[in-house]
Image: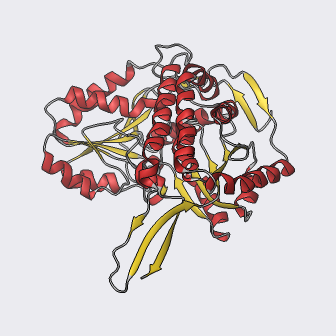
């Protein structure tokens, strides 16, 4: 089977295969992107670039059902969730089109000595390489490509090998929106070819969303070649329950936070940390609720939980659960699979000497922990290699902000899940990477902040 192929995870059927590019084709793609950077970044205005991106947003809206159906067969996302992802992607493009001139406006600096003026003028980096994952095939591209194209950068986009059809559809949208040749190029490249591209002097910077292993490999090559990198990696986000007047609402949020996208999201709630007096009722209600969510055909409009993305992902999750139980965890619910359809699963009793304590479960598996105090909850939440997102549930506003200050993560959501927005920066610390995407901070990553000092 080809490196790039659509393999329906619900059926195992190989739907379509795509050839990997040749080295000569990769060189040609880099040459085209490099040649396009001047006309696109210097010879067009921000408003002109923004208008094309606005058209990209409109085409996403117009084609959202078709695009949702593509990723249902590529990686098993239920169609309704796929359409929602496309709608969010369109909103991202629209947001940057609306705010681009504001974000890229000159910034005056008040001089402390001397006469004249000084400004920071924001200009493009040049050619950027984006390396995108399979779990949100449209959203990940939107938050990388949207702002950077408006800034005036040109883009080489390597999508996940299991998402070639959605990658093709995105590139077609850009062409149909009127993006000039060479400005956005989809490349079906191997890992070795990507290393070559990172090292090539025509490529100025790299953005990767993926695993820690992939991030380390990319950062190593980029570091040797003095290229800037933004890395959005894995997460094992804590969901901390400290106090509530409505436990049912907290449980509803916990189920949604764990099972969205089949649990295959880096910023999904994964570790549920509950204080003593709420632990038993939370565990009972949460277990009952997740048991009601059964995996089903992702093509059905009513499906909430589809299959995992691939056979390898399913086998990896099955092995993780088995090892966790073998090392002392209690299997409260689930734990079995049928093909790539994995039961919703709840684990308790995971101790620090269990490998599962430090691992990320990428699928519908929840770990529930009992703690005796706020301080113990914070310590457990921070005792992880990751630092992406986190969730704090309490009816005490002072406690909420106090705990938020102590959490070692790039994002803290208080009494809410699914509260990300196009205007809110997304990213983490520690093993979850560095840099930000979305909002003003995301738009600022691949910008040359050029000082222009004029003497009086």
List the single residue furthest toward the front. Answer: 456
Image coords of residue 21 (percent x, y): 81, 44
* Residue 236, above or below 417: below
Residue 300: x and y, percent? 53, 13
Vertical order, 72 against 148 (above or below): above
Please give the name of the residue rendered at 54% of the width and 26% of the height, measured from the top-left corner: 77
Which quadrant is home to the C terminus?
Answer: bottom left
- Rendered image quadrant of residue 365: top left
Look at 73% across and 22% down and name the residue there: 15
Q: Position of residue 373 (x, y in %)?
A: 18, 50
Image label count: 0
Residue 264, horizontal then vertical, whole percent: 50, 36
Height in image: 171 above or below 189? above
Q: Residue at x 62, y 33 (%)?
A: 177
Tell which of 63 and 402 is nearer to you: 63
Q: Say left or right for 253 vs 42.
A: left
- Name the side, left or right, on which 196 lies relative to 391: right
User: Would residue 43 be visible to someone looking at this image?
Assistant: yes
24 or 406, nearer to the observer:
24
Q: Quadrant of the N terminus?
A: top right
Q: Does residue 318 appear in this view?
A: no
In which quarter of the view is residue 248 placed? top left
**Residue found at the far bottom of this picture:** 114
Q: Nearer the viewer, residue 320 or 93?
A: 93
Q: Residue at x 38, y 21 (%)?
A: 291
């Amino acid at each position: 089977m080809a490196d790039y192929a659509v393999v329906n995870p619900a059926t195992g059927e190989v739907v379509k295969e795509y050839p990997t590019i040749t080295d000569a084709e990769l060189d040609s793609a880099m040459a085209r992107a490099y040649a396009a950077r001047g006309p696109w970044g210097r010879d067009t205005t921000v408003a002109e670039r923004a208008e094309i991106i606005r058209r990209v947003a409109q085409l996403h809206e117009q084609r959202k059902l078709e695009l949702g159906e593509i990723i249902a067969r590529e990686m098993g996302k239920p169609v309704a969730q796929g359409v929602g992802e496309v709608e969010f992607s369109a909103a991202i493009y629209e947001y940057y089109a609306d705010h681009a001139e504001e974000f890229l406006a000159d910034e005056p600096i008040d001089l402390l000595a001397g006469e004249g003026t000084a400004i920071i003028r924001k200009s493009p980096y040049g050619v950027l390489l984006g390396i995108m994952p399979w779990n949100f095939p449209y959203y990940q591209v939107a938050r990388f490509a949207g702002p950077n194209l408006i800034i005036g950068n040109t883009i080489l986009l390597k999508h996940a090998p299991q998402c070639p059809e959605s990658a093709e559809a995105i590139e077609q949208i850009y062409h149909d929106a009127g993006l000039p040749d060479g400005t956005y190029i989809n490349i079906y490249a191997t890992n070795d070819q990507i290393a070559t591209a990172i090292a090539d002097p025509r490529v100025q910077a790299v953005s990767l969303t993926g695993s820690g292993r992939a991030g380390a490999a990319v950062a190593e090559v980029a570091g040797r070649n003095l290229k800037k990198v933004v890395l959005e990696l894995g997460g094992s986000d804590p969901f901390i329950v400290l106090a509530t007047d409505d436990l049912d609402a907290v449980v509803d949020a916990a189920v949604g936070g764990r099972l969205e996208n089949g649990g295959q999201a880096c910023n999904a709630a994964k570790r549920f940390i509950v204080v003593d007096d709420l632990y038993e009722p939370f565990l009972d209600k949460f277990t009952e609720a997740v048991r009601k969510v059964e995996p089903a055909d992702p093509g059905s409009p009513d499906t909430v939980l589809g299959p995992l993305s691939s056979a390898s992902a399913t086998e990896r999750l099955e092995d993780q659960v088995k090892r966790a139980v073998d090392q002392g965890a209690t299997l409260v619910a689930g734990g079995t699979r049928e093909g790539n359809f994995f039961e919703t699963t709840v684990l308790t009793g995971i101790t620090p000497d269990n490998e599962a304590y430090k691992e990320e479960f990428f699928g519908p598996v929840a770990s529930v922990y009992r703690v005796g105090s706020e301080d113990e909850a914070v310590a457990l939440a921070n005792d992880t290699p990751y630092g992406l997102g986190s969730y704090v549930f309490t009816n005490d506003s002072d406690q909420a902000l106090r705990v938020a200050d102590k959490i070692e993560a790039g994002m803290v959501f208080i009494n809410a899940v699914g509260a990300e927005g196009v205007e809110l920066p997304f990213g983490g610390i520690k093993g979850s990477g560095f840099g930000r995407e979305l909002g003003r901070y995301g738009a600022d990553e691949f910008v040359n902040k050029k000082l222009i000092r004029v003497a009086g």
